[in-house]
């Protein structure tokens, strides 16, 4: 019976993504100019060539890795760039450059760690301290920059980036290494063994509160609890953590006006429709305007007749609202399904991994990806208070794109080792 190899399946799926990208850009061109331009074909060819390079690197370094994660990442980035182009062609060009950098980071990670990524565990404390250092950078007066009330950005020369995205991955590496080493003693509940773990996590939380980046604080707290539960199988740790979270959230609600404002708007945005609730109200109108089938790519309304944006920060914080209007309930649900499938493959990799560090690393990377998606989409849909984090692979922003490509490389490395070990074991049994 004919069967495609992992990498050949990946290549076929990438070709399908290239076709979908071409159709997407063609739809935007038709909506904007009433003609089909060769630009739509060139964008599709550019994406196919870029991901073909990533595919070749994966074929050389991780031939037994999961064949669906890279095509799904390609599809999400293609959807993001298409929508960003529809909103602002200049931003789409910059996003394309960042995707090139992200693919380079993806390839570099695979090449550097292709022999044995588990050596990262030996440097777990260094990764933890480096993560804290990165989170502190935006708080520095010389290079830190406040955007939309949160001090998340670092501006050096002509480059602006968000170091918290890379810090997230470093903290996951630290947690995977430490929890793998201490899982048995942590399961016994001895306080002294929680010292280094709580010190690193507590320092990260303090920095995040200082920079007003509470969305990332929620993300890191969730990752911490999930990895701790998987490592120890102690449900009361999660219960205690939730109690601490509720207590901390109540304190922050009283102490930080920005948090109180976000919660108030979340509970009832309509009295604040012209002030603090303007974004979420306009976002709700945008989603409702999409209906079941959507207005069509390139046909959404996101600006007034005077050219003013109806939704501030649309390409970054609220791009899901734009997609929901143009693709409708069907397209928005399909997009979430892609995210769910990505997470499903990631959790499957964690289950197949045969050593503790690999399991925890894959679990942390996948859960972080899933929780970040839920936080931003849940905020836009008013399931939870709105926070200013990005939608992975889709939102406009270079730091997020590059970090998510590194995350993708980490999952492929774990997947390759797990699948290769399974095939070796089966071969030995035969």
Image: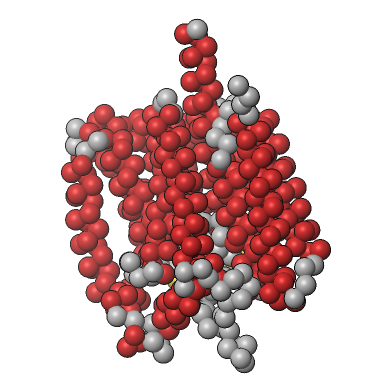
Question: Where residue 362 sits: x, y (%)?
Answer: 44, 38
**Residue that extends furthest to the right in the rendered view of this protein:** 38
Residue shown at 63% from the left, 38% from the top: 10
Residue shown at 20% from the left, 62% from the top: 247
Question: Where residue 9 sits: x, y (%)?
Answer: 62, 35
- In the image, residue 123 above or below residue 342: above
Q: Is residue 229 left or right of residue 316?
A: left
Q: Is residue 306 left or right of residue 383?
A: right
Q: Is residue 154 left or right of residue 81?
A: left
Residue shown at 46% from the left, 59% from the top: 333
Question: Where residue 80 sits: x, y (%)?
Answer: 60, 61
Count of picture labels: 0
* Front residue (pair 191, 236): 236
Question: Where residue 45 sits: x, y (%)?
Answer: 76, 53
Q: Is residue 227 visible?
A: yes
Quadrant of the rendering where the N terminus is positioned: top right
- In the image, residue 38 above or below residue 306: above
Q: Is residue 322 visible?
A: no
* Front residue (pair 10, 203): 10
Residue shown at 78% from the left, 64% from the top: 39
């Amino acid at each position: 019976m004919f069967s495609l190899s992992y990498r050949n399946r990946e290549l076929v799926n990438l070709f399908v993504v290239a076709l979908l990208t071409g159709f997407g850009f063609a739809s935007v061109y038709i909506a904007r100019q009433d003609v089909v331009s060769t630009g739509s074909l060139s964008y599709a060819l550019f994406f196919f060539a870029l991901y073909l390079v990533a595919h070749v690197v994966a074929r050389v370094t991780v031939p037994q890795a999961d064949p669906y994660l890279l095509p799904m990442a390609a599809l999400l980035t293609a959807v993001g760039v298409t929508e960003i182009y529809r909103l602002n062609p200049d931003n789409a060009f910059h996003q394309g450059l960042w995707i090139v950098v992200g693919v380079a980071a993806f390839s570099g990670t695979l090449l550097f760690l292709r022999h044995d990524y588990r050596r990262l565990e030996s440097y777990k404390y260094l990764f933890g301290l480096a993560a804290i250092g990165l989170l502190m950078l935006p708080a520095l007066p010389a290079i830190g920059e406040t955007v939309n009330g949160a001090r998340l950005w670092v501006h050096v020369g002509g480059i602006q980036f968000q170091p918290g995205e890379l810090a997230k991955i470093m903290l996951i590496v630290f947690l995977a290494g430490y929890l793998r080493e201490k899982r048995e003693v942590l399961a016994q509940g001895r306080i002294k063994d929680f010292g280094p773990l709580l010190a690193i996590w507590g320092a990260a939380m303090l920095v995040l509160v200082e920079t007003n980046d509470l969305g990332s604080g929620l993300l890191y707290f969730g990752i911490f609890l999930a990895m701790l539960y998987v490592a120890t199988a102690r449900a009361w740790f999660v219960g205690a953590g939730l109690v601490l979270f509720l207590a901390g959230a109540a304190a922050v609600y009283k102490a930080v006006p920005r948090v109180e404002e976000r919660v108030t708007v979340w509970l009832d945005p309509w009295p604040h429709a012209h002030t603090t609730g303007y974004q979420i109200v306009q976002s709700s109108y945008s989603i409702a305007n999409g209906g079941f089938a959507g207005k069509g790519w390139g046909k959404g309304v996101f600006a007034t007749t005077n050219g003013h944006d109806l939704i501030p920060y649309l390409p970054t914080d609220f791009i899901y609202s734009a997609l929901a209007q143009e693709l409708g309930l069907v397209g928005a649900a399909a997009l979430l399904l892609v995210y769910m499938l990505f997470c499903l493959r990631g959790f499957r990799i964690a289950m197949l991994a045969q050593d503790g560090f690999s399991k925890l690393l894959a679990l942390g990377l996948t859960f972080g990806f899933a929780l970040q998606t839920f936080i931003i989409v849940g905020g836009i849909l008013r399931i939870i208070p709105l926070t200013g984090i990005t939608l992975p692979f889709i939102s406009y922003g270079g730091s997020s794109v590059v970090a998510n490509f590194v995350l993708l490389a980490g999952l492929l490395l774990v997947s390759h080792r797990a699948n290769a070990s399974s095939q070796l074991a089966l071969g030995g049994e035969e």
